[in-house]
Each structure stands twice: as structure tokens, then as C-alpha cells.
Image (cartoon, rainbow, N blue to C red):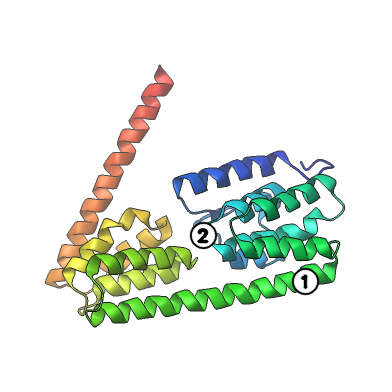
Amino acid sequence: MTNKMGISSTGIDAAKAIKQSYRTGTPICVPGQPTKILLPEHLINVDLDLVHFDDPLPLAMMATLDPESPMALAATTRLSPKACDKELIAGMYALVGEKTRHPLVSRCVDVVRENDFNPKAIAFVRTRTRQFIVQTRRQYAQALKLILRALLDGDIGAADFVEQFIKLTESGNLQSDVRQKLVTSLLLSEHVRPGIKFLMLEHFESFPLPTRQGIIQAVANAPESRHIDVLKEELRWIVSHERQKQAVIRQKRAGAGVH
């Protein structure tokens, strides 16, 4: 239940979970949908019920800690109207502008506060944020095309390509299905060297769970060939190794509970 100051116990718990996600590097998912990664579009959509993530504290946490400016800016935009007429939330909102790592977030906070939380100012910031999200995603998509072209032309090494590819797909806040299709197309392409594919699989655990599941299914359903069989075997080993690791973790937790 939310108290008069605008803070709820579920919001506090959600903020703690978000902070832990940033600390461990695990993706934040839409509440109630563990296979759907939370995107800036979700935050900017005021008609979408984000349950406990809609509380001021989780939004302030994302606005302050998220490494990507579109996500942080979207969280700030959603937080803006909640700071009106609530002294504690207004103070938290001002603190977001001071502590965030993103200049655009600071500017957003300044514009809203300078206009005394006027709905028109909040709507203006929301529109600009939506435009920024679309523009940023296009830039990341173009950057992905450029490094792929550089790879095919031999202008970039395999290790550098994989490193940049991983960073761009993470930074671009791509939806799981889009990221899955990009990785799958590389793994199944006859124009990409096997060494690059295995380098990509070395980063397999860094992909969100829905992406990993989609990749496994796509490779499993691919037409039989020598290099596809090798990929299937590699993925089987990765999945088996991950299951063994999880089993060890569960055993340790169970043992700790017994003692």
C-alpha cells in the first residue's frame, strides 16, 4: 500500500530488485512477464500498467543507475508527474537530476522543475523522449550494419566484431526477438566463419534467457549440415554445463538451509 508520501513497501522491494539487477548485470523484465525485457517504450507508455515498477522509487533508481540514456530518460519522464504536489517525491526527483550519469536526464529534470511541473512541460519532455528513443535505436541499428559490413570486407577482426556486436545489442535495448534473430542469422549464415560463431557462443550466457531460448530453437530446427551439427553439439554442451552449475548452486543453498 502506498503511503501519503507516495512510497509503498512493494515499490521499495522493486527498487532493491532493480539495484541488484544493475549490480549483477541481469536484465530487468516487465513485471509478471519474466521473458520480456523492460524497454524504454514500456516506460514511456503511460497506458501500460507496470505494477510496482510504477512507484517513484523504482523509477528513480532506473533514472539514476541505468547505463543507457534512453532507458534512464524514459524512467525520468514517467517519474515527472508523480513528483507534483508531493514534497518527498519532488526532493527525490531533484536528486535524480543531480546524481544521474546522463546529461539529458538532468536537462529533463531541470525543464520540468523550472516550469513547476506544468503538464504541458511534462508532455513536451515525453514527446522529445519518445523521439530520442526512436533516433537512438536507428543509430544502433546502423552501427550494427556497419560492423557487419566491416567483418565481411575483412576490415575488422573476429574478436573485435563479436565484442562490438555484444555491446551494441545490449546498449541498443533491442527486444529479445530482434536480438535473437540477429544472433541466429550470424550463426546460420554460410558467409560467417566458424571461428566467429564459436566466439559468439562464448558469450551465450550474457544473452537474456528469451534470446538464448530462441537461438537454441532456431538452431535445432535448422536444416541438417556439418556446421549446423557442430553448432547443435556446442549448444548442447553449453546448456548441459549451465544445468550442472545451477544444480551445484541449488545443492549449496539446500545445504546452507539444513545447517
Judge from the rendering whether residue 226 lies leftward or rightward of residue 175; answer left or right. Answer: left
x, y percent for residue 162: 30, 66
Horizontal side of 50 relative to 111 (left or right) equals: left
Task: Say whether residue 20 is visible.
Answer: yes
Q: Say which mark, if any, is on residue 37.
A: 2
- Measuring from the top left, give residue 175's x and y in whole percent: 48, 67
Q: Is residue 74 visible?
A: no
Mark 1 near mark 2, Cβ–Cβ under 8 Å?
no
Q: Earlier in the sequence, mark 1 or mark 2?
A: 2
| Furthest residue in direction top, as rendered | 259
Crowdedness near tag 1: few (<14), some (14–19) or many (≥20) residues, C-alpha within 10 Å? some
**CA distance for labels 1 and 2:** 25 Å
Q: Which mark is residue 154?
A: none
Amino acid under disc 2: Ile
Query: 233 or 58: nearer the eye?
Result: 58
Locate residue 223, reporting x and y percent. Answer: 21, 75
- Seen from this angle, which residue lies furthest left? 226
Q: Amino acid at mark 1?
A: Ala
Determine whether the residue tagged by mark 1 lies in a helix, strand or loop: helix
Q: Nearer the viewer, residue 102 or 33?
A: 102
Q: Residues within 10 Å of mark 2 (few under 14, many from 20)?
A: many
Specify the quadrant that holds the N terminus: top right
Quarter where residue 101 is shown: bottom right
In this view of the protein, which residue sits in the foreground, 254 or 54? Answer: 54
**Residue at the spot 75% in from the left edge and 43% down from the top edge:** 7
**Badge 1 is on which residue?**
123
User: Image point 35% across, 68% down: which residue?
Assistant: 165
When the figure is inspected, residue 176 is found, relative to residue 15, above or below; the finding is: below
